[in-house]
Image (cartoon, grey):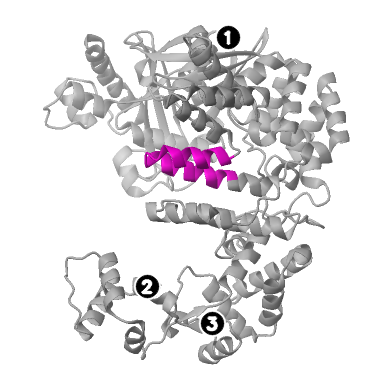
Amino acid sequence: MRPFPVLPPTYYHSHFMEMLTFVREVYGALLGDAETAFLSAFEALSPEAQCVYIRMSNRKRAIFTRADLDYSEIHHIDLSLQELHEQGFVRGLSPDDYRTCLDGLTRPALTDLARAYEIEVKSTWPKARLCDHLHGQLSFEDFLAALADTPRFLPAHRETVGFLLYLYFGKLSGNLLGFTLRDLGVVQVRQKDSYQARFISREEALGGYAYTRQLRALKGATPKAYLAAADVVTDLPPATTEFTQGLRDKLLHDLGRFFERQKDNERAVEFYAQSGLFESQERVVRMLYAQDDHDRARTLLEAMLDAPVHDEAFIFADDFYRRKFNGKRTSVFTDLLRDGPLIEADDLYRGLPELAAARHYEAQGFDVHHVENGLWPALFGLLFWDELFESEGALSSGFDRLPVALRDRTFQHKFAEAITQKLALIERGDATEIILDKWNRHGAEENGVFYGWPGLGDLIAAFLSVAPPLSVRQVLEAMTQDFHGLRDGFPDLLLMGPDGVHFVEVKGDGDQVRRHQLARLNLLKTAGFAVDIARVTFVPDPDQIYVVVDIETTGGRSQSERVTEIGAVKIQRGEIIDTWQTLINPERRIPAFITELTGITNAMVRDAPVFADIADDFAAFMKGGVFVAHNVNFDYGFLSQEFRGLERPFRYPKLCTVASMRKHFPGLAAYGLKPLSREFNIDLRNHHRAMSDALAAAELLRMVNAKRAGN
C-alpha cells in the first residue's frame, strides 16, 4: 500500500486561505458587509493568530480554555490569543453562553461547583438535570468568579465562517476536512480552469444557508425544538429560487410530519398545504379523506391530475381517485403484482430475491444483469459527459460531484442543441462509440451522476446492440428533462435474449412496490420496453445444486491473509455430480505453523496458479449453486475478499453445516468437522486438506438435507 503523504504542520492554514481566495474570486458579488469585513480583518492578522483562529473554528467545541490550544506548530499561543481578542476574533463568556458552558463541564467539575456554593444536588441526577439545577440556582456572575483561574473564551464570526464554507462546499461544513483528504489522496477533485458560482444571488445563498441550518437542527430534535421552528419559519429568508423553494418545502413537510405525529391534524395540514412537495400533497389528501372531508380531498386530487409535479404524483392521484371516487376495488400496485410472474426458489435464497430471480431467468437462457439504478444514469452521464463535466463552469468547486446544470435544473435549457444532436445519434443507433469512449476515459472517476463497476462498458455495448434505439432515446430524453426525479427507482434486473431486452423488478415475500419504482416501470413500458414485477416465493427445492467448499489459507484474517487451496464438491439430489480442486500460490510465504497444520508447504504452491488465474474456473463451477461450508462465513469471507481484490462480485446463498448440525442434531459434545466425522463414521483421512474436508462436509450436508426434507 502506498503511504499517505506527510502534510506540513500548518496545512490547515493553507486550506483555509485557499478557501477564502476561492470564495473571494468566485463569489465576490455575493459577499455582504460582514463577509467583506471578516476577510479584510482576518488577512491583517499575524500568521500565528490566524492559525489559532482556524484551529478553533475547525473544532466542534464551542468554548475553549488556554489548555485546549496547545499546538506544537504555534509557538506564541498567548500573544496570538491576545491579538485575536483585541481584533474581535475571540471574546469572553456572555450570559447567553452560560448554559452551553455548563454543558461542557465534567460531572465532577459540576459537583465541585455546587459544593463550593453550597447548592444541594443529588448524585443520582443525570448530567442534564444537574446543569439545569445549577443554571437556575447559581448566578452568571458567581459562575464567572468560580472560573476566574481558568477563563473561557469563544471564537467570534462563527456564523460568517460557516456561511463562507457553505458558499464553497454547497453544504454545511464545520471544518476543512475535504481539503485534507484531497491532499492525502483519499478523495479525487476535479481541477478546472473556471468554476461557476452555485448561487445566482446573495438572497439565494442566504436562504439556502438558513433553511439548510434549520433542517439540520431538526434532525433528532425534541418537540420543543420543532415548536420553536414552527414559530420562526415565517421569519426565514424568502424562497426566491427553485433551490431555496425546495429547501423550504422540505422544512414545511418535516414540520407537517411532526404535527401529524403529535395528532395535531389541523396544524399538520396547515404546514403540508404550504409545501410544494408531492409527499406533502399526498399526506393532505389522505388526512382530509380520513377526516371525511371528501370534497376537499377530491378537489386536491383533481388539481394533481391536471398538473402533476411528476409521474409518481400522477400515479398516486389517479389510483387514489379511481379507488375512492370511482369504485375501483384494487390499486395499480395490486394489479401489476397480480399480473407478474411468480418464481419459486429454494428457501436458502430467502433474503436474496434478486439473486433467486436471476438464477431462474438464467435457467431459461437469458443473459441476466443486476442493473437497478446503475445502467440508465450511466448511459445518461456518459452520453452527456462533455456538457455535464467539461463545459465552462460545469462545477462550483473541485470537490463538487454533481454538475451545476443538474443541481439547478438548467441542463435541458442550457444544452438544448447538444441534447437534440446526441439523442438523434441514440435514435439512429450511432452513439455507442461515443459512450464507450467516455467510459474508457472517465469510467473510473468519481462523480455525482452514476457509479461505475468493472464490466459496465461491456454491458452497455451489449445492451445498446439489442435494445430498441427509439426506446432508449425516450428514456434518456425524459432524464434530460428531470434527472433528479428519474435517477433512481429503475428495475432490478436486465434480461437480454434472442427476443431483445426485458426489465424486471423483483419482490420477495412481504416486499412492496414503491411508487417511484412503479413510475419507472411505466416510463420503460411507455418507451416500448417489456417490463414485469416478479414475485419470489421460497420453498424447499429438491433439485437445488449445492457446492460444498473448503479452503486452506495462510492465516485466519481474510483482510490480510490469502487462500492456498480450494476443494469443492457439487451435489444434487444427494449425489456428488462433480468435484473441483486446486492449490493456489498465495503470493506470500506460508507460516510454519500453518504448514504444520495443513501439510501445505511453500514448495508445493510455488508453481501453483495465483487466484486471478483460477477465478473464472471456480466461478463457473459455483454458477447456480448454494455455497456450503463447515463454518461457512470463514470460507465465504476469504473467497469474497479474493474476488473483491479482482473487482469482481461474489454473491451466493449460503448454508453452514456447523449451524445446521447444531439445529438438526442437538446435544452433541462437539460440532467441529473432526468430531462430527468420528460421531457419524464419516471418512476424513486427510483433515485440513481442502478436498478431504469438503467431502466430509458434503456427507454432513446429506444428513442436514434429509432432516430439512423431513421437516
Q: Residue at x 19, y 21 (%)?
A: 664
Residue 527: % across, % down: 71, 16
Q: Is residue 484 magenta?
A: no
The amino acid type, in three-letter code, at marker 2 is Arg
Indicate the amino acid at tag 3. Val
> Which residue is at a point 68% across and 33% down the rendered structure image?
378
Closer to the camera in the image, 353 or 304 = 304
- Amino acid carrying mark 1 in the image: Gly
Along the line of sight, the residue nearer the viewer: 14 or 514: 514
The disc, 2 or 3, on the residue closer to the chain's N-terminal end is: 3
Q: Position of residue 512 (x, y in %)?
A: 45, 22
Q: Which residue is mark 1?
A: 365
Q: Is residue 591 in view? A: yes
Give the left or right position of residue 555, taking residue 195 as reference. left
The boundaries of the magenta stretch are 249-275
Q: Nearer the viewer, residue 174 or 163?
A: 163
Q: Residues within 10 Å of mark 3 (few under 14, many from 20)?
A: some
Secondary structure at badge 1 equals loop
Specify whether residue 170 is in view: no
Which residue is tagged 2? 99
Residue 561, position as x, y percentages in the image = 42, 45
Mark 2–mark 1 Cα distance, whole angstroms, equals 69 Å
Give the labeled residue for mark 3. 90
Q: Which of pointers 2 and 1 lies earlier in the amino acid sequence?
A: 2
Dot 2 crowding, Cα within 10 Å, few <14, some 14–19, many 20+: some
C-alpha gap between disc 1 and disc 3 = 71 Å
| 425 to 443, vertically: above or below | above
Residue 519 vertical placement versus 135 (above, below): above
User: In the picture, which quadrant includes the N terminus?
Assistant: bottom right
